[in-house]
Amino acid sequence: MILLIVYLLIFNILKGQSLAVNYTQSLVEITETHLHPPQTAGADYASSIPLNQGAFVSVQDVRSRATWCLLAYGNPPIQGSATLKIIPDIASVPPEVVGTHTPSELILQVQPQPLFSGIGPVDQLFLSFTLEHAQVSQNVNTSPVYIQYQLQEGGCPPGP
Amino acid sequence: MKHRIIYSILALFAFLTTSAQIIWTEEHTHFELHFEPIALIAVSQQEIQLSPSMTTTSGLPAFTDSLSASFHLRYTISPVSPGPQLVHSVSLPIGLSSRWSTTPFLPTSGTCSLAPSATHNGTDQLLTSNIFGHSGTAPQDGIPLTVRISWSHQQYQNLVANLHLLNLTYQCL
């Protein structure tokens, strides 16, 4: 009896929820067309550059009524003063799977930040990305953007 | 004893589920962000009216006259090699020769500047040095550029249109 209770409790906590994130591009290019004005001497990169990048998020193996929160963080940060904004497309999933306190966007930081509040399994949640505050003098060459996604039990906390 | 163990387990479970949010799983991802080297390849193309506005004070068609235009350098810069140079190229309508010059400018920021002034003398390329640094800007309203074009009376007569393209290319090496 005791073992059964322990098993049920641990199973409930540790059962294999799965999280998958698939990007549409493995390489995103920033060119002179992203200057503001484009291709202009003396211009710096536009303060906000929508990237030719998207991601599909899938959360599976959760109970149909289970609430959860998807968080994201980046480590190490992007070079220079550039930041990355992630925008969840709420319209890409059925409204019944969208939980409360889903943020409209997330500025990638080294600490996990709430990105999407979900209920039950979710398939093909689309994320879009915007590069902000990139500078010609600071952002050069090719560098990896590392993003960690974390799936937590329970909905996201209310925003500030 | 049995009940005590069960209560302890339940208490532990309650503590775990209320005191901290449980991380179910985590996904580590990455993609590459590539900033295209902005090696300053720029083409400015501007239509310049050659005639009939170009006349001498006597009212006759000029055989030598000056055209002045300010070209907005459309260049972008990212690290370039040490000691970069700025190459100006000009192509004119066939049969015309030219002299053209630029004046020094100071960048509003950064360091890809043209100094000193330079003069193009018959070939189609002008090479200037003293380009500083690795990145920079030009004035937003362009580099002042004067083109002096000379042609014969016959060449003038052969001009078939009032507008001709004067193609200028800038390349930071």
Image (tube, coloured by chain):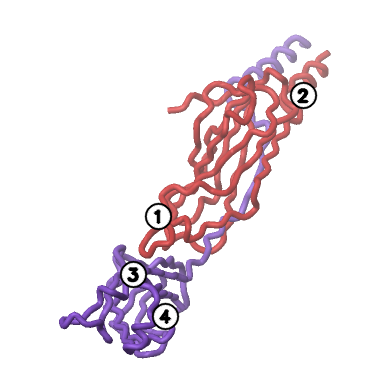
Q: Chain of mark 2?
A: A
Residue underneath mark 3:
B71
Q: CA distance from mark 2 to mark 3?
A: 71 Å
Name the residue at 31% across, 80% down.
Answer: B147
Looking at the picture, how far across and down is residue B62, in whole percent?
25, 83
Q: Colour of chain A?
A: red
**Which marked residue is nearer to the observer: mark 4 or mark 1?**
4
Disc 4 chain ID: B
Kindly identify the residue that appears in the image at 77 percent across and 24 percent down.
Answer: A11
Residue B93 tag number: 4
Name the foreground residue: A154 vs A47: A47
Chain letter matching colour purple: B
A101 relative position to B145: left or right: right
Locate the N terminus of chain A by quadrant. Answer: top right
Residue identifier under label 2? A11
Q: Which residue is mark 1?
A: A36
- Distance CA(mark 3)–CA(mark 1): 18 Å
The percent position of residue B32, horizontal first and vertical second, equals: 60, 55
